[in-house]
Image (cartoon, grey):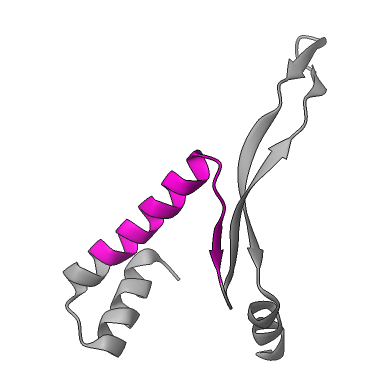
């Protein structure tokens, strides 16, 4: 499912025009991104959590040059689904 599909389904279900729904969806995604970029997690009860995970520094190898490089510690975004979300998906087989 794409963002356009989500917008169409929400517009159909609510009766709100697609441009307004698109603005809301993009605003939601922007707010989640902004919160994660400042290190703040986003919790949506019954859906899941968008969290920031920290990857530790590690040593890697560049095979083509046969050298060792250090990959510094960095943050990555992650999604952890809520239990009711996971159980709802697993039951819909």
Query: Looking at the magenta stretch, what is its main secondary structure?
Result: helix
Percent coordinates x, y for residue 46 in the rendering = 58, 78
Q: Is residue 7 magenta?
A: no
* Extent of the magenta region: 23-44
Left or right placement of residue 76 versus residue 29 in this view: right
Percent coordinates x, y for residue 72 in the rendering = 71, 21
Task: Write the residue at 66% across / 73% down.
Answer: 82
Instruction: Indicate whether 93 appears above or below 74.
Output: below
When asked about the image quadrant of residue 15, the answer is: bottom left
* Position of the N terminus by quadrant: bottom left
Percent coordinates x, y for residue 53 in the rendering = 68, 44
Instruction: Indicate whether 58 appears above or below 16.
Output: above
Task: Write the residue at 37% across / 60% down.
Answer: 28
Q: Is residue 31 magenta?
A: yes
Q: Nearer the viewer, residue 80 or 61?
A: 80
Task: Write the residue at 31% across / 89% down.
Answer: 13
Task: Write the residue at 20% across / 73% down.
Answer: 18
């Amino acid at each position: 499912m794409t963002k356009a599909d989500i917008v169409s389904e929400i517009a159909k279900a609510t009766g709100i025009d697609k441009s307004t729904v698109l603005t809301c969806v993009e605003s939601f995604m922007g707010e989640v991104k902004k919160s994660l970029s400042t290190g703040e997690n986003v919790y949506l009860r019954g859906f899941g959590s968008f969290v920031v995970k920290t990857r530790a520094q590690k040593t890697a190898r560049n095979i083509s040059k046969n050298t060792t490089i250090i990959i510094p510690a960095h943050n990555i975004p992650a999604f952890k689904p809520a239990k009711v979300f996971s159980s709802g998906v697993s039951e819909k087989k």
